Each structure stands twice: as C-alpha cells, then as structure tokens.
Amino acid sequence: MAIKPEEIAAIIEKEISGYSKQLEISDIGTVVEVGDGVAIIYGMEKAMAGELVEFKSGIHGMVMNLKEDYVGVVILGPDEEVSEGEEVKTTGRVMEVPVGEELLGRVVNALGEPIDGRGEIKAKHTNPVERLAPGVVVRQPVKEPLQTGIKAIDAMIPIGRGQRELIIGDRQIGKTALTLDAILNQRNSDVFCIYVAVGQKRSTVARVVKLFEDEKAMDYTVIVSASASEPAPLQYLAPYAGCAMGEYFRDSGRHALVVYDDLSKHAVAYRQISLILRRPPGREAYPGDIFYLHSRLLERAAKWDDEHGGGSLTAIPIIETQAGDVSAYIPTNVISITDGQIYLEDDLFYAGQRPAVNVGLSVSRVGGSAQIKAMKQVAGRLRLDLAQYREMAAFAQFGTELDASTRRLLNKGERMMEILKQSQYSPMSVEDQVMIIFAGIHGFLDDIPVGDCRRFESEFLHFIGKKHPEIGKKIVADKIIEEETRRGLENALDEFKETFRRSDESRKLDIGNKPEEEQAQKGLPEAEEKEQEKEIEEGKITGNDKEPTGKVELDR
C-alpha cells in the first residue's frame, strides 16, 4: 500500500500543532544518608535555602544546609519511609502552609494538614512559613489593649495588640493556664487566636481542644500541634506555621493572638536538628544562631499602620525555667527579644496565690499605653503598693512591733493579694476588674476579714450587675471613671456592705441563736465555776461539796 505524501504532511502538521513549549525543569539528587529526621542528599546543586523538596516516596522535606558536595534536608514526616539511594527533586517553591478562615475550629499539624479527623481543609490561600518582619516605618505604636481577663495581668502587666509578652516560670505552675484564659477571654472580641503546642503530650492537647469546644472558643481558634512523639523537624516548623496563619489575619486588617507553648522545647528540637546536620555547637550545645531562631519568629508580631490596614499580630511565647533560673541561655535570649515578661513564682503558687505572678520581676515595657483610662485610674499605684507590701511582710516576719501606718499597709496589701487571686478558666470582663480593684484600692475591704474577700468580690459583682448594671456599662462606654460614675460606685459599695454578712458576724449570730440547754452545757462552764467559788467564800458550801467542773485538781 502506497503512502501518499499528503497524509504524511497532515500527520506532521497535527503533531506540530499539539507541541507545547512548557518544560518541567527540576534538580535531581540522591539520598546518601538518612536518620533522625535528616537526610543528606548528593546533587541538587541549584537547591535554595528553605526550598521544598520531594522524595520519590511522596514525603516532603525542607533544605537547611547548603554544602559544596551535598545538601542537608530535614524530613517533614516519618523518616522510615525514606531510604538510601532514593531519588529527590526540587520543587522551586519555599515551604508554605494553608491559611485563612477555613482553618478556624480545626486542629492541624505543622504542615497545616488536619489531624482532628474532620475531613480536608479547602483553604484558598497559603503563606510562606518564613517571612521578613514588618519594618519600623510601617508599624504603629502599641496602644490598644488586648484584654486577657486576668486581674493581675490587665491591672499591672498589661498586654497591647502587636506586643510580644513572655510568660516564664518553672513547670506546672500555671503558664499554659494564663494563655488559655487569654484565648477564652477573646470570645466576644474581634481577635482570632492560634495556639501552637510544641513538644506537648497528645493528651494535653486533647484536653485543650475539649476545653475550647466546651467554652465555644474553637469558633475563632486554630490549634497547631507538634506533639512530643513527632519528629524534631515538625516541632521546629510548628511556631513558624502558626505565625504564618496569624499573619493572614493581620495582613487583612484584623487582629490575631498567637501563643507559642513552649519555645524551650522548640529550641531543643532545633538543637537536635543542628547537631545531626553537623553544625558547630556553642553554649549548652545550642548552635550559634539560636538567638536568631526566636528573634525572627517574634519580630513578626506587629501592628500595621493605617495605610496597611491597621491589623495586628500579638505574640505570647512561653519559656520553662529550671528551678527558677531566669539567667539561663534560652530564657535570657527570649527576655531580650520580647517587650516584657510575666514571671510566675513557684513559692507563690504553692502558697495559694494563683495566678502566681511575681510583681517585682514581671514587667510590661508598653505599660499604661495598653490599658483603658479607667484601669489606669484604679491600678496606677497597685504594683508599687504590692511591692511595698511584700517587702514589709518579709520584715514583719521577725516579730517586731509595727506602727499604725505599717499595719494599715500590711492589712491593705493582704486584702489586695487576696482579690488578685482568680480561679482557672474564669476570665473577667474589664469593667468587673475595674470595680473590684476600685473597692480594694479605696479601702472598702479594709474591715472585711481576709478569708471573706473572695466571697465579697463574687457577691458584690453579682449585686452590682443586678441592682446597678448601668455603672459597668458606663465604664465600658466611657473607658474612664467620671465623677458621677465614681459616686455611683461608692454608693453601691456602701449599700452592699450593709447587707454583706461577714464570717465572724455569722459565728456570733450562730452562738446567739443556740438553745438555752446547749448554751448551758457548752457555753457557760466558767460562769458556773465562779458561782461555786463565790458560795464557798460566803460559807454557804464547803470546798468538799464543790461540784466537779471538768478540771483535775492535785491533792496537796
């Protein structure tokens, strides 16, 4: 059969018309060593730092080391699925995670993949995990408060939107509880929250999820979990992934709060990766860039100026100390990066002062700029007064005689410490905080027994919410205590104190209401004895006729 030239030409024309100029160019390498979450790859000469690479098994990795002969890659998944001799190719993309409203209410891993069993997350946007922090020129000063709902913090160590405030202390003394309270307190605000759990037990993360679900906090919260059982590269990546998710809200003109719990375990994970990558160790075997690890993360917390939408990202990192040593390597690094620290002291915690905030060592470098005017009016001298109280209380332990002014200072300080106590997972509104601190500062608690102060607080706030709700509403609306509001608050306190039943008064009333027979048996042995002694003196009865009074007398 003869082939016609026309047919050959038609076939060639068809092939030419379907030709595409798109070329897929990728740099190929080979795994020469793998273990402990790190792969050493020969080849890939054009790989970039921080670039995403793909192993033939489908696992992804991120380039960390660029050497002349090889590339060091951290494996973002189980390293058991990667084997020596496996082919690896570059993707031309940097490491990024999904961001957006679709993540709210979900629990994800460090790659943004869901781990809560509720299906796929169809996010429309992604953000790179590593980004440059906003420059100084495009930032606003921190001047808008982020209410945590914790009296001791909002009154003395306020946190503002766009600030970086460190929470530091030993293990198991309430560091995480403070941040969870702060997240719960955003329920009726416009702040979105990201809770990053690094190196925590999965059971601990599950309890946090259950708490947020019960309190309806998952509606505005994303949980990023890199638990203790996960590889070190995922623990290293998790805080940056959480920060990228928070930046989405900041860059769209909204407000976000991100909690890093905790950066001590984050530093340990990075140390492990660095040692396996054969980076030179420094102090405490941490690599030389350990400071930069946290500074480039926390510097991304900022408040944009109005031209860029005015959004904010607030960061609350947590650092765990060993035996209260704040001068260790990682604690001093993060203290120098942040805008203040809240120091929790174990002695206060075990003495029942919870939250166990040490007023002397805690500081907010933003100060009153992050408070409403009403809070500044009532709590302006609170830190100084409590510092004086603690110093004087230590001096008074020696049993020296104290003058009247010192006794007043001690009595007032004792009651102020009592009303700064707060139950776990029960944040307070700012107006309630202002009103109870007003009562303490202005001496309305001075004649109340210390043991009754907490009950006085709860009953007074219930009373004022029921009888005088306009006072709290006016504080919220005006953000300042006007003279009329002050008089109304003082009158309400006087009115409530008339009806408040103190515990010592209750005991007196209980004794007075007992039946006469019970009082005769329990309350009057001394009077009976005195009557008998009087009769002996008058000669009506002899000492031998004296009835026993319950006391043992020795024969002479």
Image: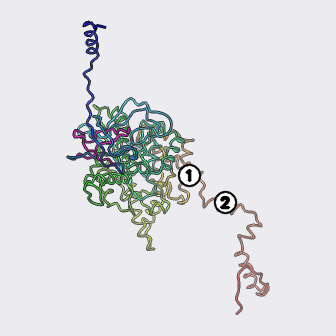
Residue 433 or residue 241, whichever sits in front: 241
- Quarter of the image that includes the C terminus: bottom right
Residue 488 or residue 73, whichever sits in front: 73
What secondary structure is marked by label 2?
A: helix
Instruction: Give percent across and percent down for residue 469.
Output: 53, 39
Crowd rating for badge 2 (residues with CA inside 10 Å; few <14, some 14–19, many 20+): few
Residue type marked 2:
Leu
The label on residue 91 is: none
The label on residue 509 is: 2
What secondary structure is marked by label 1?
A: helix
Q: Is residue 12 above or below residue 113?
A: above
Quadrant of the image occupied by residue 146: top left
Q: Which residue is mark 1?
A: 497
Quadrant of the image occupied by residue 281: bottom left
Question: In the rendered structure, does residue 453 fall within the stretch colored magenta?
Answer: no
Residue 299 or residue 60, whichever sits in front: 60
The answer to whether residue 353 is seen in the rendering is yes
Residue type marked 1:
Lys
Q: Is residue 1 above or below residue 192?
A: above
Residue plotted at (56% across, 45% down) = 462
Residue plotted at (36% across, 56% down) = 362
- Is 134 left, or right, of 236 in this rendering? left
Label 2 to label 1: alpha-carbon separation: 17 Å
Region of the chain picked out in magenta, as a range: 38-66
Residue 340 or residue 411, whichever sits in front: 340
Instruction: Give percent across and percent down for residue 198.
Output: 40, 49
Quadrant of the image occupied by residue 23: top left
Instruction: Give percent across and percent down for residue 474.
Output: 46, 38
Instruction: Determine the residue located farthest toward the left in the rendered image.
Output: 68
Instruction: Give percent across and percent down for residue 212.
Output: 50, 42
User: Of marks 2 and 1, which one's residue comes earlier in the chain?
Assistant: 1
